[in-house]
Amino acid sequence: MKKTIPQYIKAALLLAILGSNACTKNFGDINTNPSLVSKPDVKFLLSYVEDKIVTYQGTEWVWESMEQLMRFTQHVTSSPYEITNNVNTRYNNYYLQILPNLYEIRRQVDAMANKNEYQKIAQVTYVLQVLHGLKVTDMNGSIPYSQAIQGRYDAKYSPVYDEQQALMNNWLSQLDNAIKVLSDNTLPTQVSYGANDIYYQGDWVKWVKLANTLKLRIAARLENADKAKCQAVFQEVMKDATGPINADDAQVKFVKTEYTPFGSGADIDYRSRRYATTSIMAFMKKSNDPRLPVYFEPNDLVGAYKDTLAKYNVTLPAFINPADPLIQFQGGPADWTTNPTVAGYISNGFIVSPYTKYNLISPINRKFFSPKLNQATGNFMDVPVTYAETCFYIAEFIQKGYAGGVDTKGSAEDWYKKGITSSIQTMNQIAIAAGSTVAYTGTGLTEINAYLNQPDVKFNGINNLERIYIQQFLGMYRQPNEAYVFCRRTGYPKNNSTYYARETFNELIPRRFWLTDPGEVNRANWNTAMQQQGFTPNAQDLPTLSSQRIWYDKLAPDFGKGN
């Protein structure tokens, strides 16, 4: 990230714009007194929003991603804590930190005498609205959008909850218009955000690529509800002259030295340490995945452990193969009740002697997620929209035959290989920034090519789609929301697969979160939204949340039951 943070701190004035009430139950309490701020510069407003899209997630990583979503996707295993009111901070952030400031940018632009020179500055705001808006609707379904900020400017405090299908159509239209304007080279000379644009430093072409990749995200979400629309959107993206994100340098990357989502202590282990599941560990070991030491820490079976075992005449538990060349990496059951013997070693060391015990199950690589762990000096790099994700969407849609006669600029296998390559390279960049264990040194081409030629990775003409799915799944290790949406929409990894099987998981998995009664001022619209979606108002219990689905999820398979 460019050194723009000190300058855009001026945007702290937005605290006055946003008001002091951090609760979104009553839209009348939000952004009702714009006279408290003189007039924050639109460039600082953009910096503020780009920052908040990432940094609001400090508590989300702890309470939602680590404790819930990453367990449901079976990227990690840990103690099964209840879902609390600490989840769904994405919702509050949208209405307190993001939308008001994006609307303010456009309001100021509309009032400018030279507003024709700010058209591209204005259109970027719609891309960001969609970026975070998708994440909000993913777990909430219908949400206020078309009328959400009218309280600030028009004193209307009871916004309707836009239905999800309408949201998707609106967002696609807004992205199309943004792409049109941002791609237009005939406009008057445009004012640039420059260094105040933390993501792209005012590069309009990269904003077009992001907008197209967001269209692919929407297409993937639409597939089960409207396959024809999914295909049409995919073809539109591939026909676009600029296209979607097409290289690592067009990814959305964010690094801020001060951002420490898990603090400088041991908050990464808050309430429970997280470990590799049996399934992800087995596959990564079998395929010799370079990301293995990036994702997970070795257990204690390193160094002279064999001598110690021999000294005390102790044999390792039966689930560990003593001849395993990667014995230092072991997974545990995703659901502890399915294999309590192995699960017992997750919370307890293997006792070798009165003086020695070994932890056998590999934890997540804590420094990869928490670079300041124990006063270390690494930095947390977030890549909320990746080139790999783009590649896997394209590979998936080509493999399903959705391209029609459109030029996809490569085969499904070509895009699959690009996705794997980019995933490994990006994870390595994140690890380097964190001061963590890396996948490779140098260019990494040797390691990446070796992985692409692994029998469990190469296209084989039999289960190519499943291979695309599994690499998409592995590549989303640092994107918990996208990984959850992927598993929910596809049903992969699937139960009983001979390639990569989802583990038995007896716990109920919520298909959505909840929005509680907003109070008298907007209760009628809230009730209407609950009824339209078939949601039980105020329900927060797992039986209800696991059975009631948002619109685009209605026809999706159950977790693990992909076709």
Image (cartoon, rainbow, N blue to C red):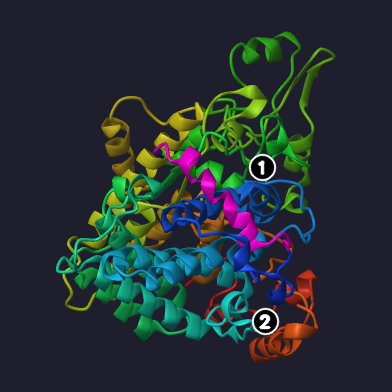
Which of label 1 and label 2 is nearer to you?
2
As drawn, the label of residue 332 is 1
User: Residue 523 placed where, x, y %?
Assistant: 75, 85
- Residue 62 magenta-highlighted: no
Farthest right residue in view: 354
User: Residue 532 placed where, x, y %?
Assistant: 65, 91
* 390 is higher (above) or lower (below) than 200: below
Residue 296 or residue 59, whichever sits in front: 59
Quick one: SS at disc 2? Answer: loop
Q: Is residue 145 left or right of residue 464?
A: right
Amino acid beneath label 1? Gly
Dot placed on the residue nearer the N-terminal end, 1 or 2: 2
> Is disc 1 surrounded by few (<14), some (14 to 19) or many (20+) residues within 10 Å?
many
As drawn, the label of residue 157 is 2
User: Residue 403 placed where, x, y %?
Assistant: 24, 74
Q: Tags 1 and 2 in contact by the CB under 8 Å rule?
A: no
Q: Which quadrant of the figure contains the N terminus?
A: top left
Residue positioned 64% across, 28% down in the render: 373
Name the dominant secondary structure of the magenta segment.
helix
As drawn, the label of residue 346 is none
Residue 487 or residue 159, whichever sits in front: 159
Magenta-colored span: 2-22
Q: Is residue 394 visible?
A: no
> Is disc 2 surrounded by few (<14), some (14 to 19) or many (20+) residues within 10 Å?
many
